[in-house]
Image: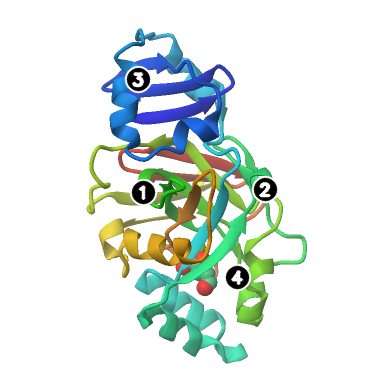
């Protein structure tokens, strides 16, 4: 099942049929435990409308309202390696190796809703940075009681030169206007997402694909529930929360994003998140 936040209202897609929910408050709509079962019950009294399919493409809003966006770091071997390399002159490499192995994961605040764009929106490069990459990540939607109810696609835009200069600059490398993209929908499965799910990215520049990569989510070092347990230990989320689960795809060091690049991130079962770099 997929749920789209659109200018026409909340649209539920189930087995190829589209339903317009009678509910209009995104936060109250998504922040429910056992969401799949609740939505299944709700669509029993709704009439399918094939015309809604186009609204899930042309009238889309990001799948967020009052939720904070958090992120996990160094959850894949590739991220650990790339970060040790970029920070070796600053003596920061050891921190990444240690956090990869430690029981406590790296979790950081990524974005307030107003700094988050959806598919079709523009992501940004900081003006004081010369080395920038997208980070394609599976995002968990967790309801206020702490259960994982859905998934979406995220782009954790990162300034590698700023983070590499000193790991203490992480918040500046990660948090700025247009640094987070999520969408296109919330995927609400009956069971946890298939561990063989693939994440794919392609970066288009004029008519060329200048970088592409893929990874399966089963290459992640930690369990989704483990990340959620730590996040919810001392934080409450009255409207639920979105948690990026970390990147396993890092372009070569010679690559940096440019204005005009189009970033397409596809995750099996969910769809494609597409953003242009402003
Ligand atoms: O340690 C810095 C951030 C790591 C990160 O964003 C990731 O691994 O995806
Ligand atoms: Mg990341």
Q: In the rendering, which numbered label is found on residue 115?
A: 2
Nearer the N terminus, badge 1 or badge 2?
2
Residue 146 place in picture, x, y as percent: 40, 52
Secondary structure under badge 1? Answer: strand
Relative side of 130 to 262, left or right: right
| The N terminus lies in quadrant | top left
Q: Assess mark 3: CB under 8 A from ligand 2?
A: no
Q: CA distance from mark 1 to mark 2?
A: 23 Å
Q: Residue 42 got which mark?
A: 3
Give me the residue at 68% from left, 44% from top: 114
Is disc 3 placed on a helix, strand or loop? helix
Q: Earlier in the sequence, mark 3 or mark 4?
A: 3
Q: Residue at x 39, y 15 (%)?
A: 19
Query: Does the residue at mark 4 contact the one at mark 2 (Cβ under 8 Å)?
Result: no
Q: Which residue is mark 1?
A: 148
Sequence-earlier tag: 1 or 3: 3
Q: Does the closest atom of ligand 1 sit within 8 Å of the Cβ of label 4?
A: no
Q: Look at the image and tell me whether residue 83 can be seen.
A: yes
Q: Residue tagged by mark 4?
A: 160
Give the Cα separation between the discs numbered 4 and 1: 30 Å
Residue shown at 51% from the left, 66% from the top? 234
Give left or right: position of 134 versus 45.
right
Judge the density around disc 4: few (<14), some (14-19), many (≥20) Cα neighbours within 10 Å. Answer: many
């Amino acid at each position: 099942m997929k749920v789209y936040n659109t200018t026409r209202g909340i649209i539920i897609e189930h087995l190829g049929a589209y339903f317009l929910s009678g509910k209009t408050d995104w936060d109250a709509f998504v922040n429910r435990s056992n969401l799949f079962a609740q939505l299944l019950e709700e669509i029993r009294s709704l009439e399918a409308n094939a015309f809604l399919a186009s609204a899930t493409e042309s009238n889309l809003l990001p799948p967020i309202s009052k939720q904070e966006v958090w992120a996990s770091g160094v959850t894949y071997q590739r991220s650990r390696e790339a970060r040790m390399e970029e920070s070796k002159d600053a003596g920061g490499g050891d921190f990444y190796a240690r956090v990869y192995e430690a029981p406590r994961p790296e979790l950081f605040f990524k974005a307030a809703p107003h700094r988050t764009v959806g598919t079709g929106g523009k992501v940004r490069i900081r003006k004081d940075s010369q080395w920038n990459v997208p980070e394609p990540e599976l995002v968990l939607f967790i309801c206020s009681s702490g259960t994982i109810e859905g998934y979406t696609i995220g782009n954790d835009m990162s300034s590698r030169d700023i983070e590499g200069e000193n790991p203490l600059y992480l918040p500046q490398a990660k948090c700025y206007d247009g640094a987070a993209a999520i969408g296109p929908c919330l995927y609400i499965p009956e069971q946890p997402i298939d561990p063989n799910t693939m994440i794919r990215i392609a970066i288009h520049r004029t008519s060329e694909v200048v970088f592409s990569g893929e990874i399966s989510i089963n290459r992640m070092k930690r369990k989704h529930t483990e990340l959620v347990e730590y996040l919810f230990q001392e934080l409450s989320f009255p409207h639920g929360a979105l948690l990026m689960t970390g990147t396993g795809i890092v372009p070569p060091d010679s690559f940096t994003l440019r204005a005009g690049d189009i970033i397409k991130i596809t995750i099996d079962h969910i769809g494609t998140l597409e953003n242009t770099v402003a």
